Image (cartoon, coloured by chain):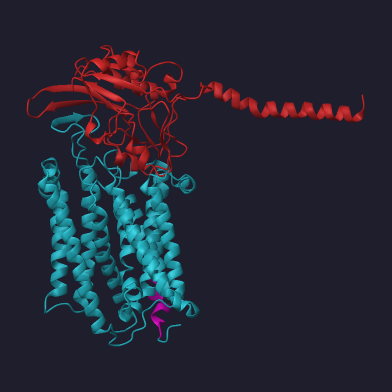
Amino acid sequence: MSDIDLQRRNFLKTSVGAAAVAIAPGVLLFDMAHGNPQALSGKVRWGMLIDTAQCKPGCNDCVTACNTENGLSGETKSTDSQWIRKIEIKDISSGRELSLPMMCQHCENPPCVDVCPTTASFKRADGIVLVDKHRCIGCRYCMMACPYKARSFVHEPLSDQNPDVPRGKGTVESCTLCVHRIDQGGQPACAEACANKAILFGDLNNPESEIAQKVRTVATTQVRADLRLNPGVRYQGL
Amino acid sequence: MASYSLSKLRSPLYYALLAIGGLVVLAGLFSVHLMEEHGHIITGMNNQIVWGMPHVFAIFLIVTASGVLNVSSIGSVFNKPAYKARAPLAGLLSIAMLFGGLTVLMLDLGRPDRVIVAATNFNPTSVFAWNVVLYSGMFAAVAVYLWTMMEQRMYSWSKPAGFMVFIWRFVLTTGTGVIFSFLVARQAYGTAILPPMFIVMSFAWGMAVFHIVQSSIYVWNQKILDEYVQKRMRNLMGVFVIAALYFVATYHLTNIYFARQTEFERFILLDGGIYPWLFWAGYVVLGNVLPLLLIFHPALGKTRCVLLASSLIILGAFALLYVFIIGGQAFPLSIFPGYEVSSSFADGAIGQYQPSLPEILLGLAGVGIAFMVTAVGIRVLDFVPHEIPKSR
């Protein structure tokens, strides 16, 4: 074999080796992060239907499940994050009382995304509204803009985070619809935890899905529908 | 250079004042360091009152930075010589206050280290992103304007430059008002009256700051302000104060008329604790009634009265901004109109806010920065007005 051939072979071997070393950690990390290689489909619109008749006052199971899943402290000081909360409401004129969970409503036209200066707040093709924790500068304009008080600001240093749910001091966060579960074919922790099945999760755009069928047949409401934000979370019996 | 002596600017007192300004800035920077280390938990801000004391200071400084340019606009755009002589000082004050305000706003961010992210990721639908352009453009516009006024060869350009600044500051203050106008769901905000209201308030506050700075410089250098100039500027300030009050009154009256807003107005104007107090006693009485009396009462209106009136106008400005920014957030969002609401996240409850020392120090650092830039500016360059007595 000529010298040139040997040199070429060595060069190729080294190049392939170097490329493997460069790419391997990325592939490994992607796998560790349970990344989904498939591009998101804009045909899907994830949403929830909350049946207030099934939601029991005093029951906090969805909140607890959310806190556990996402590594939140579960404390309720005014500076603590609450991605989902139970709200007790009472009709002032009739006295009718209801209990319901409130979280990011994953609007089609989210004000938080509109106002975010750095595009850290964004909406995925499948309708999930998220905050890019690497891009958020912590200006809190999205918190001012959200009509649902759905967002929290991380006021303190964090420890013991769930690797699937990165959070960061000085950034804004909110319900991710458990996007890490959805990307694995699962459903949000709150929906799973509700013993009364008051939270129905699914694809609003798929006419065959249970949620789409139900939304078609029963009267449902979007909170602050007057704002025309078209939230992906709907309420029944409101 | 100045034809008269500014020897006082070389006195130990000058350096002592500069040192005090420096200490105020350092205290603010130390607060920022603490906020970086411990998080915003050491401020009074929380998940309901997300903008607090730093924003009151920052918005005052930014709005006033635009308003103080009245003096130069009237000089350059409307050709009034008495104002023209003061245009460089107004330009310097504008840059100084803008610098102070923006520093506060930036250092209050949850991640101030990511300022480069803000500069490189631009969301075209975000008024905050527009303001990044508007604020930095303002620095450039005023700097060019100052250059055309201070460099003899560029004099002929000072009118077009002044006109550019005139337009730019209108857009800038509109941009600041629009930050709140675009908040669709907050009862205190989300109305198109806010940008013009901010513009008119900027006129009044800018004149007040200019008066204080000008009087201080004159007193310190034993110069006497021309009586005619004083009268003109004082009366103009009075008119702006009345105009601003008119806008604030219209804003509240319109709200009171809407059934869905009456509860909010009741909170801000009557039973909201500190907020009605600050509004009526702080803004209306101290910030409007008294200054107007001091300005327009025939027996008053002298130098000291004008200085006191200006200080009161600034005090009123802070009171109004506190009510507007913090009171506006303290009133709960109406997520379920027509329902009584309660939750662990303070839904339906009045937001609690206790400003903490670090955030106040950060806000004061903005004022300190504005002071230092002005003090150094008038020391190294010729910013002090050259009086043409009895100028018309």
Q: Would residue B189 be counted in the magenta stretch?
A: no
Q: Which of A175 and B242 lies nearest the eye of the viewer?
A: B242
Chain B hue?
cyan
Quadrant including the N terminus of chain A: top right
Q: Where is residue B265 in the image (x, y as percent from the top left)?
A: 13, 47
Quadrant including the C terminus of chain A: top left
- Quarter of the image for residue B267 reads top left
Instruction: Decide if residue B62 is in sight here.
Output: no
Q: Position of residue B167 (x, y in %)?
A: 36, 63
Residue name at image x 40 percent, y 22 percent = A44
- Quarter of the image for residue B287 reads bottom left
- Quarter of the image for residue B41 reads top left
Residue name at image x 47 percent, y 49 percent = B119
Residue name at image x 39 percent, y 65 percent = B96
Up the image or down, B356 lies above or below A190; here it is: below
Q: Position of residue B46 (x, y in %)?
A: 29, 40
Magenta: main secondary structure equals helix
Please report the bounds of the magenta region as a residue range: B5-17
**Chain letter, colour red in render:** A
